[in-house]
Image: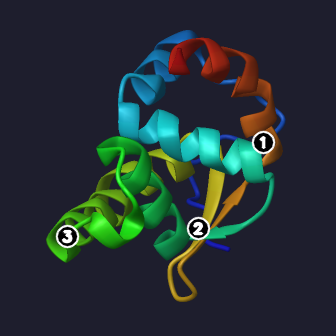
């Protein structure tokens, strides 16, 4: 799994400003909620499909391919790197795997409130 050198250790909790910045994005909240709910490593493909279904309130078969592509691109280039930097996930770019860290469990109570 890829872990950026400047990412905080999993034992630390996030500073409040960083938490707010992370939870500001509904897509990141959904991604974190999925990782918390499944409590295991997920592929970016699985995350993309789950996020599309939740955001569009449609069956995955009704979600256009270009929408899936845009979600996948935003996860890869924006959301996952931000979560890696915060120490909430580890990302294996070659295998497209996103793995929650222990630090995500510390954020879970605030994630539940933010998702409401």
What residue is pinned by disc 3? 64
Q: In which quarter of the image is residue 64?
A: bottom left
Left or right of 24 in this view: 80 = right
Q: Earlier in the sequence, mark 2 or mark 1?
A: 1
Percent position of residue 56, x then y: 30, 46
Left or right of 11 in this view: 110 = left
What residue is pinned by disc 2? 91
What residue is pinned by disc 1? 10
Q: Quadrant of residue 61?
A: bottom left
Q: Which of marks 3 and 2 is nearer the N terminus?
A: 3
Helix or strand or loop: what does disc 1 sit on?
loop
Q: Is residue 49 or residue 28 the one in the foreground? A: 49
Left or right of 1 in this view: 74 = left
At 47% from the left and 13% from the top, the residue drawn is: 17
User: How many numbered callouts?
Assistant: 3
Q: From mark 2 to mark 1, how far is it between C-alphas?
A: 14 Å
């Amino acid at each position: 799994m890829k872990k950026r050198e400047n990412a905080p250790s999993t034992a630390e909790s996030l500073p409040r400003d960083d938490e707010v910045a992370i939870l500001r994005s509904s897509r990141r909240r959904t991604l974190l909620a999925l990782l918390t709910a499944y409590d295991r490593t997920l592929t970016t493909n699985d995350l993309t499909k789950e996020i599309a279904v939740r955001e569009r309130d449609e069956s995955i078969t009704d979600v256009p391919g270009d929408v899936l592509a845009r979600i996948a691109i935003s996860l890869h280039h924006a959301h996952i790197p931000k979560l890696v930097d915060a120490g909430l996930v580890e990302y294996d770019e070659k295998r497209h795997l996103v793995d929650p860290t222990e630090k995500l469990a510390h954020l879970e109570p605030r994630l539940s409130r933010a998702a409401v």
